[in-house]
Amino acid sequence: MAWARLMRVSRQLSEKVEDALKRGDLPPLAWYDALHEIAAAGEAGIRPFLLIDRMLLVQYNVSRLLARLEGEGLIEKLEVPGDGRGQTVRITEAGRDLRRRMWAVYGQAIDGLVGRKLGTADLETLARLLGKLRDPPVD
């Protein structure tokens, strides 16, 4: 019962966030997720294979997403010195701007869907319980 409820709520919340982004004429949540993780990597950028492990959303085709972000000028690819085939990706100023605009909508959606419905103690309990399910677990 808990598993089914977790899956349903996760799907519903994601769909509602996607709807909010769409109403704001913004790209899908996967774009924000990728831009967030790329920005968090700093100026050195991040290798695409590492990005897959860090993304919040299931993303089966990260290379296609990265190509789209690059085509929109939101990220840039950098060669890895000494690795002829290796690349890192780094966020551009346009990517930072889009990420800020998306967060304005995304953050408001999170607050409305979760923050206003659960008190501080409930949020801490939820975070702690979900942390136990992570691999590896987090406190």
Image (tube, rainbow, N blue to C red):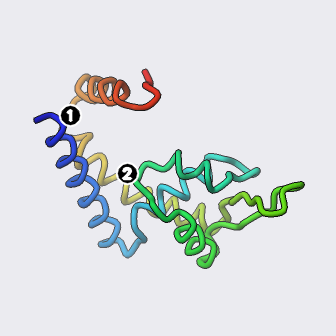
Residue at the image point whose x is 65% and y is 61% from the top? 91
102 or 41, nearer to the observer = 41
User: Which residue is the extreme one toward the left?
Assistant: 1
**For mark 1, what is the residue?**
118
Density class for disc 2 (Cα within 10 Å; few <14, some 14-19, many ≥20) is few
10 Å neighbourhood of mark 1: few (<14), some, or many (≥20)? Answer: few
User: What secondary structure is found at the residue carrying circle 2?
Assistant: helix
Q: Is residue 32 left or right of residue 96?
A: left
* Mark sitting on residue 107: 2
Which residue type carries mark 1?
A: Leu
Image-quadrant location for residue 117: top left
Looking at marks 2 and 1 on the same chain, the residue that comes earlier in the sequence is marked by 2
Q: Residue pushed farthest bottom?
A: 71
- The residue under the point 61% across, 48% down is 50
Percent x, y of residue 51? 58, 51
| SS at badge 1 | loop
At x 47%, y 28%, the residue is 136
- Image quadrant in which the N terminus is located: top left
Q: What is the tally of numbered marks visible in this picture?
A: 2
Q: Amino acid at mark 2?
A: Gly
Determine the residue positioned at 89% across, 54% down.
82
The correct choice, above or below, for 19 with respect to 117 in the image is below
User: Does residue 67 lie above or below 99 as drawn?
Assistant: below
Q: Is residue 107 left or right of residue 99?
A: left
Look at the picture and state if 75 lies above or below 36: below
Q: Locate residue 64, reporting x and y percent.
A: 54, 71
**Position of the C terminus by quadrant:** top left
Residue pushed farthest right? 82
